[in-house]
Image (cartoon, grey):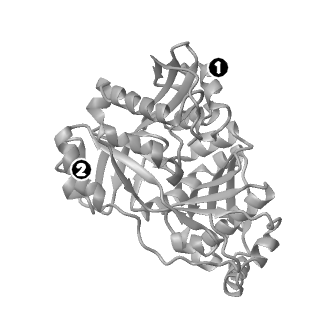
């Protein structure tokens, strides 16, 4: 989230709410966005919507000051949350008829999300010329208004804000005034690039002997792989295999919010060639894995991987991708690598440190919202043994 700013305009009551990127007043949107967040760029939003318009609903909002100046933009997604663990299913199913059990081991619920379900971080809104407190209050008010839309009210019962970095909670906690419950899920693993790291050799040299040896083992095992960038055309040509590899990983995930497809990756590469990376791992003529990332300002944001588990262990495909993220960040002189959640242990072995991120949830009905409290309180980050691979104690 942005730094707190001194307000020099007063928020008005005028908002522009649309359901498609094509309806967004581009000049107003770009005046607020200012190329500060790739996930809130019109190019990204259009690419995402084009690939998934038949699978999820979108809302885009511009808020205006009293003088007519656009001061805030926000993005919403209406998605299906799928939980395979059933850890909270029996409790959640008591809350609303909008919650369903489709089959014995899968639980689903429709959720209105302020943010982006396909990436971690503060990607739901941006503002200018107003304070962070004003922005937070305005987004809260927009959300309450959207929930009264017949189409949204009919489809969703839970509203979710995802997800805020620790230095933003002074502002995001204002959502509690609207009876939102705050909670944390698994940490985001973050690696700070050090000034002394100009190349991968520098990075590896900063590691303790044990971890450097482990890294060299990964490179030795993955030596047969050819890892390279794919063009949008190549992504399209390999779309069937990409869907298979992506599906393999999703099958092993505990939960998901919707699902990207190969067409989304094609669109991202075509619309954001300098900001989106799609890297394939080839074993001879066979694609055995892929990784994606966005270059968002000075941050490499690792997004998705697809794997053929038949080859993953022998050729260390996933671990090689982790080192490849580091390498790509160094080549581009980036400041941080965000590796997201899951696989915290192996990510810590390459130097990433855990950062807690806060989410906020609210049920549409006040009584059900009270029942939601103990469920939310029971959700907490998973435990793992943190590894510290560097000779020096770098902190993020």
Q: How many numbered callouts?
A: 2
Where residue 134 sits: x, y (%)?
47, 31
Q: Position of residue 193 (x, y in %)?
A: 72, 63
Tell me if residue 120 can be seen: no
Q: Nearer the viewer, residue 326 or 1?
A: 1
Residue at the (57%, 42%) spot, across then down: 264
Residue 291 drawn at (x, y percent): 63, 58
Along the horizontal axis of the image, is 309 left or right of 226?
left
| Residue shown at the point (31%, 37%) measured from the top left | 178
Quarter holding residue 39: top right
- Quarter of the image containing the C terminus? bottom right
Q: Is residue 312 left or right of residue 198?
A: left
Which residue in the protein does label 2 denote?
372
Q: Is residue 144 visible?
A: yes
Secondary structure beneath label 1: helix
Nearest the viewer among 52 and 330 is 330
Horizontally, is 321 left or right of 165 in the view? right
For label 2, the SS is helix
In which quadrant will I find the N terminus? top right
Q: Which residue is mark 1?
A: 27
Report how far apart the C-alphas of labels 2 and 1 lie in the structure. 40 Å
Q: Which class describes the residues within 10 Å of circle 1: few (<14), some (14-19), or many (20+)?
A: few
The one nearer the camera, 281 or 26, is: 26
Q: In the figure, is residue 327 to the left or right of 123?
A: right
> Is residue 61 shown above or below 324?
above
């Amino acid at each position: 989230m942005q730094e707190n700013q001194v307000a020099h305009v007063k928020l008005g009551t005028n908002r522009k709410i649309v359901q498609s990127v094509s309806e967004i007043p581009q000049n107003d949107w770009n005046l607020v966005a200012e190329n500060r967040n790739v996930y809130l760029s019109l190019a990204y939003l259009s690419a995402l919507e084009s690939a998934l318009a038949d699978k999820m609903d979108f809302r885009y909002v511009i808020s205006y000051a009293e003088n007519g100046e656009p001061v805030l933009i926000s993005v919403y997604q209406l998605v299906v949350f799928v939980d395979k663990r059933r850890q909270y299913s029996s409790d959640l199913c008591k809350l609303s008829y909008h919650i369903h059990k489709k089959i014995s081991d899968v639980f689903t619920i429709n959720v209105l999300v302020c943010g982006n379900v396909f990436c971690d971080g503060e990607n739901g809104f941006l503002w200018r010329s107003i304070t962070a407190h004003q922005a937070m209050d305005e987004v809260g008010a927009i959300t309450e208004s959207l929930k009264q839309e017949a189409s949204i009210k009919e489809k969703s019962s839970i509203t979710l804000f995802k997800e805020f970095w620790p230095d933003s909670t002074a502002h995001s906690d204002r959502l509690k005034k609207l009876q939102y419950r705050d909670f944390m899920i698994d940490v985001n693993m973050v690696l700070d690039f050090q000034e002394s790291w100009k190349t991968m050799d520098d990075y590896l040299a900063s590691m303790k002997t044990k971890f450097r040896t482990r890294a060299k083992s990964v490179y030795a095992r993955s030596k047969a792989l050819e890892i390279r960038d794919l063009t949008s055309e190549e992504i399209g040509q390999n779309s069937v295999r990409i869907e298979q590899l992506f599906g393999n990983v999703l099958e092993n995930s505990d939960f998901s919010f919707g699902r990207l497809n190969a067409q989304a990756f094609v669109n991202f590469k075509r619309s954001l060639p300098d900001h989106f990376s799609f890297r394939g791992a080839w074993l001879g003529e066979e694609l055995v894995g892929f990784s994606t990332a966005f270059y968002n300002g000075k941050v490499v944001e690792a997004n998705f991987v697809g794997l053929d588990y038949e080859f993953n262990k022998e050729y260390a495909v996933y671990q090689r991708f982790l080192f490849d993220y580091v390498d790509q960040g160094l080549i581009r002189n980036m400041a941080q690598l965000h590796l997201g959640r899951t696989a915290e242990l192996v990510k810590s072995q390459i130097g990433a440190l855990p950062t807690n991120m806060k989410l906020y949830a609210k049920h549409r009905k006040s009584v059900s919202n009270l029942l939601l409290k103990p469920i939310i309180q029971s959700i907490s980050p998973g435990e793992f043994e943190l590894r510290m691979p560097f000779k020096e104690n770098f902190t993020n």
